[in-house]
Amino acid sequence: MGTDEPATVRHVAIIMDGNGRWAKKRLLPRAMGHQRGVEAVRRVVRGARELGLEALTLYAFSTENWRRPEEEVSDLMSLMKRFILSDLDEFARAGVRLRIIGDYSAFKPDVVELIDGAIARTAQNTGTTLAVALNYGAQDEIARAATKAAAKGPITPETIAVELDTADLPPLDLLIRTSGEVRLSNFLLWQAAYAELYFTDVLWPDFTLDHLKEALGCFANRERRYGGR
Ligand SMILES: CCc1cc(N2CCCCCC2)n2ncc(-c3ccc(F)cc3)c2n1
């Protein structure tokens, strides 16, 4: 690709941070921050489709999130169920394909069943792939991939890569983190090797399609290195 051609973004990932801080700033309960955060998810999934992204990966629940208060974990599980029962209908009809990365078998059977149904329902879709990271940690993902690769023969970066949860997604082009934290927090560590990293002070509930376009614009202006330097 010559330098005068706009860089094509195929796969964007987002660490959706700042939901609790958004609520705290407004003296609202954390659950309200989560609810407004779901509205931002809706905006960004619709935006990803309009922009023709092949894949959008969202960090929804990390392996560390289990340490949150029980009430908050329960609130997040309810939020997820509501999202699948209501929003996924629209996304399924619009051609969005749902994938889950991480070990979601750790969730309650009714949640696992709901997720499996949503994956099956959208499996044939050919639009944007929405990959949601649930009970996900990159070091856990890499360890699982390495274990599978080792059982099949000598380990190389290639034999590990094909065993990652994201093996069927395009290479990661752009990783966005909201709320001003400049850390990867055990998210897509392998996949981020050559991705552009974009950090914004915007809190996730305030994130809009314009913010996504701003991040994509920054990507377009950067010249990719792919390990060149
Ligand atoms: C595990 C709880 C949780 C939290 C969460 N947050 C995190 C908290 C507040 C901000 C919104 C984003 N999101 N966002 C999408 C999903 C989702 C899950 C499964 C699915 F099939 C489709 C979407 C989600 N799930």
Image (cartoon, grey):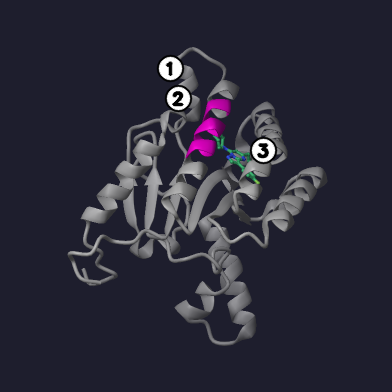
Farthest residue toward the bottom?
153
In the figure, 148 relative to 205: above or below?
Answer: below
What main secondary structure does the magenta stretch of the protein show? Answer: helix
Q: Nearer the viewer, residue 101 or 84?
A: 84
95 with respect to 108 (left or right): left
Q: Which mark is residue 21?
A: 2
Which quadrant contains ligand 1? Answer: top right
Do residues under tags 3 and 1 come within 8 Å of each other at their CB atoms? no
- What amino acid type should be assigned to the residue bearing mark 3? Met
Q: Is mark 3 within 8 Å of ligand 1?
A: yes
225 with respect to 9 (left or right): left
- Magenta segment, which residues? 35-43
Residue 110 at x, y percent in the picture: 81, 44
Q: Circle 3 sits on which residue?
A: 80
Distance in Å between CA atoms under marks 2 and 1: 6 Å
Do residues under tags 2 and 1 come within 8 Å of each other at their CB atoms? yes
Residue drawn at point x = 49 percent, y = 20 percent: 23
Distance in Å between CA atoms under marks 3 and 1: 24 Å
Residue 123 at x, y percent in the picture: 68, 60
As for residue 42 lying within the magenta part, the answer is yes
Residue drawn at point x = 64 percent, y = 38 percent: 87
Farthest residue toward the left?
4
Mark sitting earlier along the chain (3/2)? 2
Q: Nearer the viewer, residue 47 or 117?
A: 47
SS at mark 1 in the image: helix
Residue 167 at x, y percent in the picture: 54, 69
As for residue 175 lying within the magenta part, the answer is no
- What amino acid type should be assigned to the residue bearing mark 1? Lys
Q: Residues within 10 Å of mark 3 (few under 14, many from 20)?
A: some
Q: Circle 1 sits on which residue?
A: 25
Mark sitting earlier along the chain (3/1)? 1
120 with respect to 153 (left or right): right
